[in-house]
Every structure is written in C-alpha cells, then in structure tokens.
Image: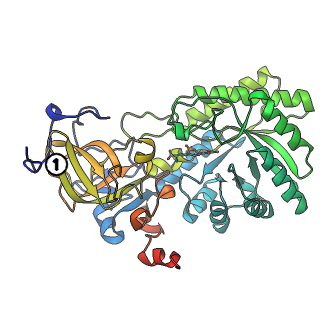
Amino acid sequence: MSRSAHPAGPRHADVLPEGHYSAPPADLNALDQKVWAQTVSRGDDGVVTVGGIPVSRLAEEFGTPAYVLDEADFRSRARAWRTAFGPDADVFYAGKAFLSRAVVRWLNEEGLNLDVCSGGELATALSAGMPAERIAFHGNNKSVAEITRAVEAGVGRIVLDSFQEIVRVAHVAQSLGKRQKVQIRITVGVEAHTHEFIATAHEDQKFGIPLAGGQAAEAVRRALQLDGLELIGIHSHIGSQIFDMSGFEVAAHRVVGLLKDIRDEHGVELPEIDLGGGLGIAYTSDDDPREPHEIAKALTEIVTRECEAARLRTPRISVEPGRAIVGPTAFTLYEVGTVKPLDGLRTYVSVDGGMSDNIRTALYDAEYSVALVSRASDAEPMLARVVGKHCESGDIVVKDAFLPSDLAPGDLIAVPATGAYCRSMASNYNHVLRPPVVAVRDGEARVIVRRETEEDLLRLDVG
Ligand code: LLP
C-alpha cells in the first residue's frame, strides 16, 4: 500500500500497533489539569492560553520552539513546598532541574533555599542574589576551584560525596581560615522504582558513600576529626520521578540508624538530615503525584518516629525537590513542519525542535503528552509520534499520543510538563539553536533565557 494513500493517517483502534498508549481520549481538545501548568486553558476560540496570553501570540512574538513557563504556577508550587514543610524544615530547590536568574529571584522571594551542583549553577545563584548561606553545594566530583569558590562565598553547606572530598574541602576551608558546614551523602542501599539512570541510592553507582560495610561511619569519623569541617548532618537522595514513599521510609530509617551510631560512638547528635529530592510529577494522565503537604507529613512522621525509637532529638529535615516544583510549570511550544502518515503504523509529526530541547524521551524512554494548541479540532484522533528535526531516528519527543487527524503544517502543538530537565539538558546537536524560556504572568510575557543565535554558536568556534 502506498504510504501516502491516507493523508489523515491511521485513525482508530482497528489499526493501532504496539505502544505505551491506552484508548484515544474522549475529547482531544480537553486539557488535563494534572499535566498542564495552572493557568493553561483553552479559550472559546479554541486557542490555548497561558497566564491569559494565547499561544499563537507567544509564537508570533517569541518564535518556536519555545519553553513557556507559568510564573504564577512556579511560585505557587514553591510556596506550597515551603508552607508544607514549615519553619522547622528547609526546602532546597534543585537547580539542576532548571536554573536561571529569574528563577533564583523567585525562589529567594518565596523563601526557598537552593541546591547547586556545579560552578556554573553556583555562579548563576550568586549573580542573582541568592544569599550564600542558603545555598547547598552538591556533586560527586567538585573541582578544587569550585570548592574554593563555594567556601569563599560562604555557602551554607557542602555535601561531601567521597573520602577524597572530605580531605579536599577540609584543606580548602582551612587554608582560607574557615570552618565549612558539611553533610555527608550516603547511599542507603534502596532500590528506587524508577529508571536505572535516575536511581541513586543503590550501591553500585557513582554517588555517595555506602552505608554498607561501615564506609559511611568511617567517613563520619574522618570528617569529625578535621578542623576545617563542621559536620552538620547526613544526606540521602534515592532517585528521581518516584511516586512510592516506601523508599523514603527505608532511607529515613537507615539515615536515623547512622545518626544513632554516631551518637553512640562520638557522643554527638548531628542536627540535620537531608532526604534529597525525587518526587514524581504527572507527565501523562496516568501519573498520580502526591501533594507537597502529603509528602511533608509522611517524611516528618517517618523521621520523628524513627528518632523517638532511637531516643534521638529529631533533626532539622531538609528536602531538595527540583522536578516537582518546576516540571509541571512549563510546556514546550512547537510548530508542526511535516505530517507523515505510515499505513498501519502511526503518523509521524515533525516539529521544529526535538531531542536537543528534550532528550528525556530518548534517554529514559520518558512518556509525555501533547495537544494541538493553536485551534480546537473535531477531527478523528490519529495515533501520532512527535519527532524532531535531528538526524537520528531516535529523535522522538512524544512516542505515542493521539492528535487530531486534520493536523497540518503550521499548527502549533505543545508538550506539557517540560519545565524540568529539558532546557537544563538541552544541547546544540546538529547545531540546532536552544529555545528561549518565556515566562508568562498576569497577561505579560517576558524572555528569561533568550533563544540561542547562530552568532552564539559561531562565537564559540574560534578555530
Ligand atoms: N538532590 C540531589 C542530590 C539530586 O541529585 C537530585 C537530582 C535532586 C535533588 C532533584 O531531584 P528531582 O526532585 O528533580 O527529581 N535528568 C533526570 C533526573 C536526574 C536527577 C539528578 N539528581 C531526568 O530528567 O529525569
């Protein structure tokens, strides 16, 4: 059969191939609030708006592709985390999910702290006025230059990730005549139910110091002996995109167990524990994330209970959500370039971006949703695969999704829940230019990270 015989492409369940999808949704024009930013809705004219602005206007003004970020949603999620944990705990936003100077200012205003894990993230945080004492510095291989910058700036804590780093940070702090507050990151041996590449508390991986075999206890011994260090707590991060709280429960149990051993051996009760980030968000309607207040209640109860059982004072808890704050607040706006129906398979919809602005589908087999946003449509659903413009067949943005079968070049489609780990993991593959981040609030849109230009590319190319 000719591949171009049916311009509208495969349509209904009678021809659906294997995939990650269920039946087509009853109404393709409906926008599930679970996966879209708070102020997103479809207007009477069928055009989707965010913060009161139609996406067609955003595309005209800022071009496509573009990450469109709902500032009100970001702030309200940040506030919800802050309020849920209250004054006796700290929320460190994980900057790796998405960081820009505007974001740093919003966090600062909403009373959150910031977790950075490179010199670049630290520079962004400091340049936007985040007070250094509210910054935590992470990473499994911080350079001496990065450590020096962090200690000089006066960061609130450095999270130590190896035996070498214990000595390195102590040495830098001492040579600067300072005593640096530190936590030790341990691996508690929990298998988080998530993709292997984003699970971080099992032992066979690069992060942290294993609790098993007494290594974490030995790290504590060494840190307590060094004058340059003030050991304030233990850190554990079990992975990302986690829905099941049982992993945190086991982690908290083991971290508190270590605190108890430290008290018994050294007579010291460490005042803090950090349980990391990793809370999942809804990428599709099938995901059911927990609310910050439920998470706060669950974590606080676990730690309090474990500490009571161990007769320890309950330490100050901190958490490091990244995705759960920024993930749902943004969508990527693309223009459809080509629509290619493959009989008996699916329709390939090519957009003007791809794996360079969202590597998560290729890297983790991540699932996303997608909607036609520049107009409403009553056409039949067609099974579509949204792909990019890169020279790779794995350049897939949304693997399986239903879009209206009258979709055509020039239509705008949007992929929700791309606020986390999309711009921050974007690349220049094929010398495709990285999209801007446009923040929208109360009827106003402004660029917070501008689109990359060919001049930017050529400026780096000095050969
Ligand atoms: N704290 C630490 C020490 C971390 O390593 C991470 C994430 C977080 C907090 C924040 O985790 P979140 O709440 O955002 O899940 N690129 C992957 C995720 C890698 C996360 C690395 N560390 C993805 O796109 O799913």
Residue 274 vs 396, above or below: the answer is: above
Check the image and name the residue furthest to the top.
309
Image position of 350 (left or right of 397): left
**In the image: residue 184, left or right of residue 403:** right
Q: Nearer the viewer, residue 131 or 358?
A: 358
Residue 330 placement, left or right of 198: left
Residue 45 seen in this snapshot = no
Residue name at image x 65 percent, y 62 percent: 125
Name the residue carrying label 1: 341
Front residue of 115/190: it is 190
Query: Position of 328 compared to 7: left or right?
Result: right
Q: Ligand 1 appears in which quadrant? A: top right
Residue 380 placement: quadrant: top left
Q: Which image quarter holds the N terminus?
A: top left
Seen at 33% across and 46% down, the residue is: 398
Residue 334, relative to residue 311: is it above or below?
Answer: below
Where residue 409 sits in the image (x, y, percent)? 19, 60
Residue drawn at (86%, 47%), measured in percent from left and top? 230
* Neighbourhood count class around disc 1 (C-alpha, 10 Å): few under 14, some 14–19, many 20 upward: many
Residue 91 position in % (x across, y down):
65, 46
x and y percent of residue 397 in the render? Answer: 35, 50
Please name the amino acid that badge 1 sits on.
Pro
